[in-house]
Amino acid sequence: MKIITYNVNGIRAALSKNWLDWLKATQADVVCLQEIKASPDQLVDLHLLEELGYQHYWYPAEKKGYSGTAIFTKITPKHVEYGCGLPDYDREGRVIRADFEHCSVLSTYFPSGSSGDERQAFKYQFLNDFQLYIKALKNTLPNLVICGDYNICHKPIDIHNPKSNANSSGFLPEEREWMENFIQSGFVDSFRHFNEEPHHYTWWSYRAGARSKNLGWRIDYTLVSESLKSNLKRAAILPDAKHSDHCPVLVELAF
């Protein structure tokens, strides 16, 4: 099962940059999107997506042009769950889940706290609530693949300048501690399972040519349940895909 996660920063903008041609070339089985910023009735290319063999499930935010997640899949899911049952996050379309025979795949878009104290507090609340949600979910669905934009750099290796960003949202000690605790609760960071090298990032600011200089942050992850560790076949970051200020992250699982 080849899974790709991608914060597209607006699916309509990505589609205008030949995103469907790129998707076809990936031959991905499951695609998790974040920050879709649209609902399916605003798109005219859905038939092209279906021609590529994808069933598509959308969870847009109530607010137009904001947030939202989606899952595209060539494998028919046994069940699709929209939301995590918590209205504050479900209004923003932050979690969608597809259950398959061997695992359940989540597309998640964690809040950003960069706009100020109010949203940072919202982010901390989300982190606490999300951990409780996943802990309960694992009781019935132990084999989880949690894809998405976590809006957190886990370790100094995951950010281009850890010293100057020590007080930046996304690299705050409390956020990094949460990430460590979450992983230690029974997950594998699939990319780091295969690659411990520095300078691998998934998001770059649009300012000052950050992407061309590779001055980035690794904030997009695919975390898999420890029970799936032996099924991990490959993981990679795909920085050459340039439809967004993020790039896609790939993981392959063998069942």
Image: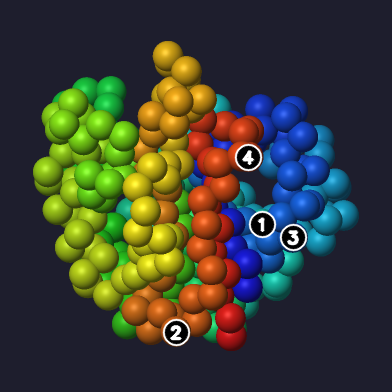
User: How far from the left and from the top, in percent, is residue 141?
Assistant: 41, 80
Residue linked to disc 2: 230
SS label for mark 2: helix
In depth, the one of 43 and 75 nearer the eye is: 75
Q: Give how far apart the Cα atoms at labels 1 and 2 are.
A: 25 Å
Task: Assess disc 4: are there few (<14), some (14-19) or many (≥20) residues with their C-alpha within 10 Å of its C-alpha.
Answer: some
SS label for mark 1: strand
Q: In the figure, residue 37 lies in which quadrant? A: top right
Residue linked to disc 4: 241
Counting residues from the start of the chain, the first of labels 3 and 2 encountered is: 3
Image quarter of the C terminus: bottom right
Counting residues from the start of the chain, the first of labels 1 and 2 encountered is: 1
Q: Give how far apart the Cα atoms at labels 3 and 2 are.
A: 23 Å
Counting residues from the start of the chain, the first of labels 3 and 1 encountered is: 3
Task: Assess disc 1: are there few (<14), some (14-19) or many (≥20) residues with their C-alpha within 10 Å of its C-alpha.
Answer: many
Q: Give how far apart the Cα atoms at labels 4 and 2 are.
A: 28 Å
In depth, the one of 77 and 21 nearer the eye is: 21
Residue linked to disc 1: 72
Residue linked to disc 3: 27
The amino acid beneath tag 3 is Gln
